[in-house]
Amino acid sequence: MTTPQPESKDRIYRSPMGLIGGVLLLGIALWLGIDAIVSGSGRTPWLALAGLILVVPAISAFTLRPAVYANQDRLRIRNPFRVVVLPWGEIASLRSGFSNEAVAKSGAKFQLWAVPVSLRARKKASRREARAAAEAAGARRGRSGGLGLGGGLGGFGGGMGGGGVVPGGSTRPESDQIMTELRELLENREQAESAQGEVTVRWAYELIAPAVAGAVLLAILLATG
């Protein structure tokens, strides 16, 4: 009797700024909404209630909910209103442009909401890399510019050092590093037997239904006011 292999643990990727922003927005919405329900008069409590029913699921969907889960067998993308499960064998590529996307072999594209692209962070990383390269080039020129014994030692030291000043840590934006990790997983696991299967998409009706109900209730209250 063969013992089934345990499932590998998921690597979980989320946006810290999205989580922080979501908590703050939810706090403000609940504070204003509950205050209006308790202290308001006439139609105000009903309008506030309808607004909360609409706004709370929407804020949660776009800030707290997005996440990307990756293990040895599949990539699971939890976006605002749906969950997509992509076995590695069904992924054609992982692309980075103005957004990060997983492209299925069927041609379908799925955005990774939890791994947003920051063009500003990319520009800052490019400037840091250029500055580090300039400093390393300056250090190499300084070592090779000595004369006599100093020059010989400088050249010897440069050979041992192997490339001058090494900047501490990676200068790449976090989202680009995450995409590199996911591409490595895809390259290593796309042919694995356990990483084959069908792409599945599930809609988050637990968020869609209350948001739609709140929107309908708010529209009715505004139309009949």
Image: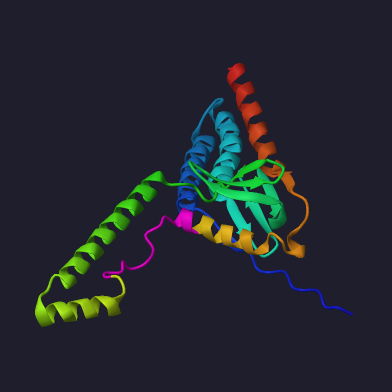
Which residue appears farthest toward the front when viewing the image? 148
Q: Which residue is more in the foreground, 166 or 71?
A: 166
Magenta part of the chain: 164-177
Question: Residue extending furthest top?
Answer: 224
Q: Position of residue 16 (x, y in %)?
A: 47, 55
**Does residue 147 appear to the left or right of 63 in the view shown?**
left
Color scheme of the displayed model: rainbow
Residue 187 or residue 63, whichever sits in front: 187
Query: Looking at the picture, how far across and down is residue 198, in whole percent?
Result: 77, 51
In terms of secondary structure, what is the magenta stretch mainly? loop
Please, is residue 115 above or below residue 187 in the view?
A: above
Q: Is residue 180 left or right of residue 74?
A: left
Say above or below: 158 vs 27: below
For residue 21: magenta? no
Q: Is residue 167 left or right of residue 37?
A: left
Q: x, y (%) of residue 106?
A: 72, 42
Task: Name the quadrant of the N terminus.
Answer: bottom right
Quadrant in which the C terminus is drawn:
top right
Q: Quadrant of residue 138?
A: bottom left
Q: Nearer the viewer, residue 79 or 49?
A: 79
Which residue is drawn at the image coordinates 55% and 25% (left, top)? 42
Q: Which residue lies furthest to the left in this view?
A: 147
**Magenta highlight on residue 175:** yes
**Image height check: is 133 above or below 45?**
below
Query: How many numbered marks does the figure carry?
Result: 0
Q: Where is residue 31 in the image (x, y as percent from the top left)?
A: 48, 43
Q: Which residue is drawn at 51% across and 43% down?
A: 99
